[in-house]
Every structure is written in structure tokens, then in C-alpha cells.
Image: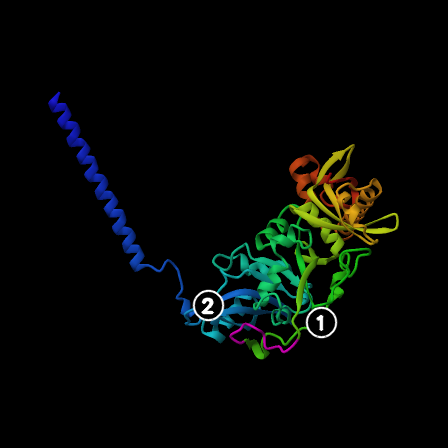
Amino acid sequence: MNEKFKRRIKDFFSVSKLSVLIYWLIIIALLGLFFTNDFGLVDIHKTAIITAVGIDAEEGEVIVTCEVVVPQPSQSGDNIKYTHIQGSGLTIADALNEVNSKTGFYPKLQFCKLILVGEDCQNQELFRMLGCFYRKNYSELTALVAMCKGKASDMLAMSSPVSDMTSEAITKSLSEEIEKSANAASVSLKDIAMREFSKSGACYMPFVEANVPGTSENGGNGDNVGGEEGGSGGGQGGSQGGSGSQGGEGGEGQTGASGQSNQGGKQMEFTARKTAIFAGGKFKGLLSPQQTFALSMIEDEIRLAVLPCDADGIHYTMGMKNIDCGIKLNVENGTPKATLSFKAKAQIQGAKVPVDPRTTANDDIIPENILKGAENEMEKRFSELIEVIRTTDCDLLGLREKLFKHNTKYFETFKDDILTRMEVEYKIDVQSVN
């Protein structure tokens, strides 16, 4: 018994010594890596951190405007500077290489949060313009993508009361909170690629506009203010109202330490209530704010949305929450049928009538005629969106993808004309919060 016990003790300590030796070897190896390898990092003093990229097209070339944060030796972040630098070439990689030659900094796109596509790129193949960003080590796929009115270089050169950095002010207009209120259809590089290279072959991105503070369009009421349907968006070209000087004559524009642009113009506010739509990589037009609202309801998770509507000649503003919206596709009796369902809880937030404060406690209990007005308005917006999808053959709702996944045997039969042949049924239910 004693000999057996002694052998167990000896084996235990032998195993322990081996484990300790392995642990020490691992630690030594990690220390060697730590002190001898930079893990692909670039010295920050040799790096130009690009926070936003603007892309414009001109005479067969792409012009890239980079909003660059230039690292400064400082005890605090108060003296951080940024500048706008341009490069051009046949590809975005060529343009970025020119940026490198102008600055002496190695341009890093891993920190790029916004890719802004100018309106003059509407006649270009979308993935010729964006393809570079999908290549390895170029940028993160979470970067937001948007088209803008006018030139991207002009918009990035503007200043904003919201933020010292123009790109940050634009990004705020595409934020998650804006998206969850159905006021913008925000997308990332990843979203665009997944939609475009699905069976549906269509994608979209928000359309950013700059407005002088104190001015705005109709807040989503009535007719399609400023909205263009299928293909009409190509007529949106022209100068950007109130835009400042371009991000540098001859390729470079410098800003001061405060981050304000030297354009000398007015500060601008940015909105993205319209949406640019694409099919097969080609620009097809712009969705109006109302159609964008409908698209967001179907495609995004909406937390709280504001819906203007009319009932018995009175204008109401409804707040809607607990929203459940989606579209299903089936083939019935040899005919594709799309069913668009919408449910929401509503509360009166405003009315174009004199208000008696004693009655506002009943805003959670909405009369049937007002609920019907809200349902009619939602159906109108959905039907306008469906009409744009039909006329442009731009499958924004992924109906071909749904057909392929759930009715595969009918895919070859209906894939080419499903958008025009399908019947659409609307099931819309708006109820009072209480």
C-alpha cells in the first residue's frame, strides 16, 4: 500500500512539473511576440486617420475627398486637427495612393465611418465606385454609405452647428435613433452587398441633403414633397445650395485647429429623408420621404414613428409604437401574391385644432374615424412604394429572394416579372394605446 501511494505522489509531481514547464514556455513565446512584432500596426505619427470619404465622378475618373484626422503631439485632445485632401485616378485605390503622396501619411480606412457618394456618380456602376472598400484590409464593413445632393467634396467642406467634424454631423442624421423612427433608411457596406448580391439584385442608401438652419421641407405631410419616382432622380444634379468651397483647390483644403471649415459660408443642417435606389448596380431614382417611411417600416425595427394623417378634414399627428410590419409572398392558383401586414399602437400627439387641456387625458383613446385615417395614410404610403418598385423593376423588398427560399419551384417561372405580375393585399391595423 505504501509503495502504491508513493508512486501516485511521484506521478503527480511529475505531471505538475511538466505543466509548469509548458506554461512557462507559452509565457516566454508570448513575451517574444510582444517585444519583437508590431502585429501589423502602423506608427501613429506616420498615419493619416480617415474618418470619412467622399466619392465624385468626373471624366471617367473618380475623385476621392478624404476627411483626415492628423495626429498632433498634445497633452489633450483639444488640438486635434483635420483636413480635407483630394486624390483622383481610375480607381479609388489610385486616388488614395495620391492622397498618400500629397501628405506623406499612410491613409488608414479602418476608422472610416462614412462613405459619401456624390450625385454625379448616378451614371456609374455602383460597385465600381464602392468595390475597393470590400477588399481585405481596406475598411470595416460597418461603415455607413449614403448618396448626397451635389458633390460629395462640397458637402464634406461644409460646417455644421451639430459638430465640428462635418462627417460626424452627417452621421448623426443617419444614426440608429433616426433609423428607428423611420426618418432615414440607413445602410452599411455590408447591407448593400448582401442586398445587391441576393436573388433580388437591388439595394438602397439614404440620400443626404444640406439645408440652411431655419429652413426645411414639409415634414412628411401631404403630397410627395421633393420625391422622385423611378429614374427621375437623375434630374437632381446641380449645385448644392449653400455649399462652401470645395475641399481644396488642386486637391487640398486645410482647416483650423478648432475643426471649422474655412469655407466662410453658413453652417448647414443635414437630413436624409429621401432614399436612392439601385438595381443591378444602376441608379434607378429617389424615394420620397413618404416612400422612405414605408420602406423603413418594412425593413427596419421601428421603435417610435410619427405619422401625419387627416380625418374628417382635420389634420392629426399620430405617434405609433409596438410596430409589427412585414411582407410575405405566396403563389396561389398560379399567381404570386404579396401580403403586406402592419400593426401598431397609436396615440394622438398633435391636432390642427384648438386644444382644451381638459380633454388631452383622452389622447390614448382614439376615435375610430381617426384610426381609419391613419390606416388609410399607411396604405397610401405602402402602395406608392409598391408602385415605384413595379415601375423601376427594383426589388427593394427582396421578393425574388423570398420566392427563391419559400417557393423554389416557381422561381424560374416568375423571377423576371414577379414585381409586375404579383397581386398585393394590405392588412393594416392601427389601434389606440389604451
Residue 306 horizontal/vertical position (percent):
73, 51
Reading the image, the residue beneath label 2 is: 77
Q: Main secondary structure of the magenta part?
A: loop
Residue in front for this viewpoint, 372 or 379: 372
Q: State which mark lies toward you, 1 or 2.
A: 2
Q: Residues within 10 Å of mark 1 (few under 14, many from 20)?
A: some
Q: Quadrant of the N terminus?
A: top left
Q: Residue furthest left?
A: 3
Reading the image, the residue beneath label 1 is: 241
Residue 298 horizontal/vertical position (percent):
69, 45
428 up-or-down from 238: above or below:
above
At a point 70% along the width and 58% down the height, the residue shown is: 273
At a point 80% along the width and 57% down the height, the residue shown is: 224
Residue in front for this viewpoint, 59 or 196: 196
Separation of residues labelled 1 and 2 (CA atoms): 33 Å
Q: Residue furthest top?
A: 1
Residue 259 magenta:
yes
Left or right of 173 on screen, residue 95? left
Magenta region, residue range: 256-265
Label 2: state its secondary structure: helix
